[in-house]
Amino acid sequence: MAKNHSSKYSKEFLNKTIQIWQPYSPIPLSLNDAREITGNITALFNFLITEEKKSQDKSVIHNNNCSKNKTGKEVKK
């Protein structure tokens, strides 16, 4: 059975993706390659955003559990 190649990205967007990434590939990139590149980049940024939020949450928890003494050193409350 043939795979459904519908995409949430326009053909224009995928062609631009190929144009940007083609210099880094020794073989011609296809629309399917552009879909995969786009999916991978999207996943990477989603991962980075999630990790940044986790880091910020840990920072808030840390700051709420610590205060500074007269010397500027952090001490737990």
Image: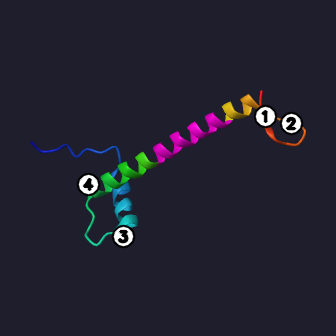
* Residue 9 drawn above or below residue 66: below
Q: Amino acid at mark 2?
A: Asn
Label 2, label 4: how many angstroms apart (C-alpha)?
Answer: 58 Å
Instruction: Say which residue label 4 marks.
Output: 32
Near-viewer residue (50 or 72): 72
- Looking at the rendered structure, the secondary structure element under dot 3 is helix
- Among the two numbered marks 1 and 4 on one chain, the one whose residue lies closer to the N terminus: 4
* Residue segment shown in magenta: 45-59
Label 1, label 4: how many angstroms apart (C-alpha)?
Answer: 54 Å
Please name the residue shown 34% across and 43% down the image.
8
Label 3, label 1: how many angstroms apart (C-alpha)?
Answer: 50 Å
Characterize the magenta stretch by its predominant secondary structure. Answer: helix
Q: Quadrant of residue 31?
A: bottom left
Instruction: Say which residue label 2 marks.
Output: 69
Crowd class of label 4 (few under 14; some 14 to 19; many from 20; radius 10 Å): few
Q: In the rendered view, does 13 fall on the left or right side of 65?
A: left
Label 2, label 3: how many angstroms apart (C-alpha)?
Answer: 53 Å
- Among the two numbered marks 2 and 3 on one chain, the one whose residue lies closer to the N terminus: 3
- Looking at the rendered structure, the secondary structure element under dot 4 is helix
| Dot label at residue 75 | 1
Label 4, label 3: how many angstroms apart (C-alpha)?
Answer: 16 Å
Instruction: Say which residue label 3 marks.
Output: 24
Q: In the rendered view, does 13 fall on the left or right side of 72?
A: left
- Looking at the rendered structure, the secondary structure element under dot 2 is loop
Q: Amino acid at mark 4?
A: Asn
Residue 52, magenta (yes or no):
yes
- Looking at the rendered structure, the secondary structure element under dot 1 is strand
